[in-house]
Amino acid sequence: MNVAVGFTGATLDRADHERNDPAALERALSDWRARLLKLDGLDPQLDQEGQLVWTSLADLPEDAEPLLLGYIAGKPHFAPLRQTERHAAARSPSLFHMLGLMPPDQASLYAAARSLIDWHQRHGFCANCGSATAIFRAGWARRCTGCNAEHFPRTDPVVIMLAEYEGKALVARQASWPPGRYSALAGFVEVGESMEEAVSREILEEAGVHTRNVRYVASQPWPFPSSLMIACVAEAEGDTLTLDANELEDGFWVTRAEVRAALAGDPTARFGAPPPYAIAHSLLRHWVDGE
Amino acid sequence: MNVAVGFTGATLDRADHERNDPAALERALSDWRARLLKLDGLDPQLDQEGQLVWTSLADLPEDAEPLLLGYIAGKPHFAPLRQTERHAAARSPSLFHMLGLMPPDQASLYAAARSLIDWHQRHGFCANCGSATAIFRAGWARRCTGCNAEHFPRTDPVVIMLAEYEGKALVARQASWPPGRYSALAGFVEVGESMEEAVSREILEEAGVHTRNVRYVASQPWPFPSSLMIACVAEAEGDTLTLDANELEDGFWVTRAEVRAALAGDPTARFGAPPPYAIAHSLLRHWVDGE
């Protein structure tokens, strides 16, 4: 397998066993080596090498709470949570630029912090009873102050896949994407279905193509806001497309040579490939390499 | 691959394109062929062949709302939601019995209905602002009556895996399980990590074993309350166990012959295998068959 994917490889020790231990959290907070992630809203700050910038807990804003991400080389690493801060749904232009600069391990660490903060900011209340919730487990859960229900950060599994037919793969684009950009189809896994069933359902819904023999390729986290991307290839039973116009603006079957040109950034390529940090890029590369 | 797993194979057409179309929902509700799932709390009712029992919309309780599961053979199928009903966290003894009787496609359909109903019942309020939420998208989402935030059913990815070392696999048990039952290790995928990273993290946390070369095997939904189970095998770098006593009561390495005896229900087997509808069973079978 060994497919290189973005947003992976952080050396973070998540220290799950410490999350229920208030004394351990106190020790981490009073550790002089503790580091605090430097953020501008939900955007990171990067140094010249694309590494995340960290500061000390002394810089924790008055209205922020520290979330214990875990330990790197024995040092506690925290992210700052401003519970009442609100963010635009869209990613900032500078973030798109920064995602291209961060090594995968830095993007991975950032993904954990971003998804966690964003989840807290949108879960200040209990879905079960409407009361306010409060942080517990060192920042990895919230508990209701009314009914005591416990809530945990959400991770949504998303399948992203290439349908394959007679040596060609299906790519498509949404109207909101950069001009010329095409990628794999994708969609959320629903309750009551397997990954493989979700892959076939989504390809049928979005492109009108029946598939079989779904093969898993690779996975990555995607922190916008909090998905687990699961990349697959499926065998199509035909190549007639009926695109769902609500979801897709265009789509077509491409050859390995066409995908190779797109991945190489060739200006004459038939389409523009997704960026290297997206698993769709890894999936296309895996496919042109003949799996 | 072709690993047989439980909770899969429903022939349900989820009709995603109709969910945003109130006229389509009206047509489905007034279709005389419409069927309503018969439930006792969250438990299903089964006929002699283990098939789910359905009734008509005329039997929808006064205080219930119909959720459109989708279409089977062109007929709309609904599940009844009693928003204010509350359930015990534990599964009923009769449900355990019924899970052993249902064919996988029936269990799959039941899983979709159960997870969806349970999610609605625990999400009557907006996590973002605390106001009441109301159903939309034909039962596949809720919208806040205060801030208009949209909420979608939750599916939690869970990795479940065998560590493998010199021809043996690691099984373990939790204190709450039936006597003698051992299974694969498992844990929730967290924000900011891939499936493969979650597999290695969980095995290290729970058993103290470092692993590499994680291989995906199969997936299944698990509606207690709403997980996507992702089964994997990982190569262990050693066989010294340091079990997490908070999570596990016991664990040991087993040979293929020992797993075969357990799967066969041999009363002299070293351990009792998980039931056939659990993906841990499929994973153990896949492993003894030599992948």
Image (cartoon, coloured by chain):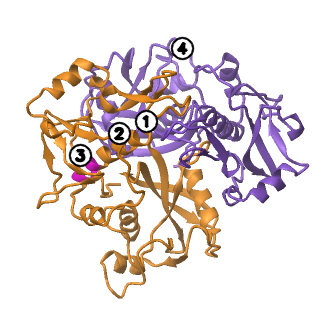
Chain colours: A purple, B orange
Give the label on residue A178, or none. 4
Q: Which of A69 and B261 is in front in this view?
A: A69
The residue positioned 69% from the left and 27% from the top of the image is A42
| Separation (CA) of disc 3 from disc 1 | 28 Å
* Residue B84 in view of the camera: yes
Q: Do labels 4 and 3 share a chain?
A: no
Q: What element carries label 4?
A: loop
Q: Are marks 3 and 1 in contact (CB under 8 Å)?
A: no
Q: Do the residues labelled 1 and 2 touch (CB within 8 Å)?
A: yes
The residue carrying mark 2 is B83
Mark 4 packing: few (<14 Cα in 10 Å), some, or many (20+)? few
The answer to if B109 sits in the magenta stretch is: yes
Q: Which of B27 and A156 is in front in this view?
A: B27
The residue positioned 59% from the left and 31% from the top of the image is A122
The residue positioned 83% from the left and 28% from the top of the image is A48
Q: What element carries label 3?
A: loop
The residue carrying mark 1 is B124
Q: What residue type is labelled 4?
A: Pro
Chain identifier of the residue bearing label 1 in the image: B
Q: Are marks 3 and 1 on the same chain?
A: yes
Residue B73 on image: x %, y %:
13, 37
| Separation (CA) of disc 4 from disc 1 | 38 Å
Residue A93 on image: x %, y %:
66, 16
Chain identifier of the residue bearing label 2 in the image: B
Q: Which amino acid does label 2 sit on?
A: Gln
